[in-house]
Amino acid sequence: MKKTIGVFGGYRFADLVYHNGQTLPFYNYILNKLKKDNFVINFAKPDLTIASINNLVHKFELKFNFNEVYLSLCEAQSTVNVANLMLFMNDFERDLREMFKFLQDNKIVTKIELLKEDNLAIKEINLLINKLSKEYNVIIINEKVDIKIIGNKNFYLSSLYI
């Protein structure tokens, strides 16, 4: 029997793009791999914040009864100046704790794909997520994001790509 998986996050899990007044599908390797053996419901949208992902998880878990949830967090906040980000760190932590506790209480396997640490803001966010994931038994899919060279291009790959 196929598992029901909820996917929440931003551009990393998106499979639709809005361009010139049209919504166009595009190939997302991660989602296609998950869809191969599971029933996947995708709630990814490029501008989702931690608070909005938290609200969506609470709202839709009750309707879809997920077996697993995949999260890509803080994509919207990843470009914020680190000084401004630190002003909201307590809010982020509160929302993450609330979401992780809800998922843990409902016995939903939770997996997170961390963002590549190419700026200080993402590094601070990943530290917070790592700390809370240990506390709430959340699985980090990619402890380290590796760069792989395929052909003449560099790709950032996590374990979901293998």
Image (cartoon, helix red, strand yellow):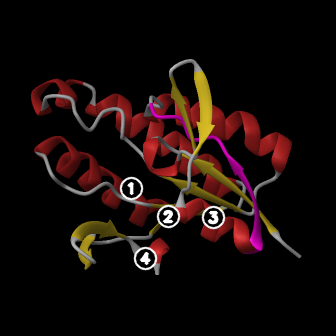
Mark 2 belongs to which amino acid? Val
Residue hosting label 3: 32
Assign the N terminus to one quadrant of the image.
bottom right
Which residues lie in the magenta part?
Answer: 37-46
Q: Position of residue 12 (x, y in %)?
A: 44, 50
Residue hosting label 4: 159
Residue at 54 percent of width and 28 percent of height? 18
The quarter of the picture where residue 69 lies is: bottom right
Q: Measure how far apart labels 2 and 1 are at the Cα level.
A: 8 Å
Residue count near mark 2 (Cα–Cα under 10 Å), binned few <14, some 14–19, many ≥20:
some
The answer to whether marks 3 and 4 mark residues whose Cβ atoms lie closer than 8 Å is no
The answer to whether marks 2 and 1 mark residues whose Cβ atoms lie closer than 8 Å is yes
Name the N-terminal-most of marks 3 and 2: 3
- Name the element at disc 3: helix
The quarter of the picture where residue 25 lies is: top right
Name the N-terminal-most of marks 2 and 1: 1
Name the N-terminal-most of marks 3 and 4: 3
Residue hosting label 2: 138
- Name the element at disc 4: helix
Q: Measure how far apart labels 3 and 4 are at the Cα level.
A: 14 Å
Q: Which mark is residue 132?
A: 1
Residue positioned most to the right: 1
- The answer to whether residue 43 is magenta is yes
Q: Which mark is residue 110?
A: none
Residue positioned most to the bottom: 162
Mark 1, mark 4: which one is toward the viewer? 4
In-image side of 119 versus 136 (left or right): left
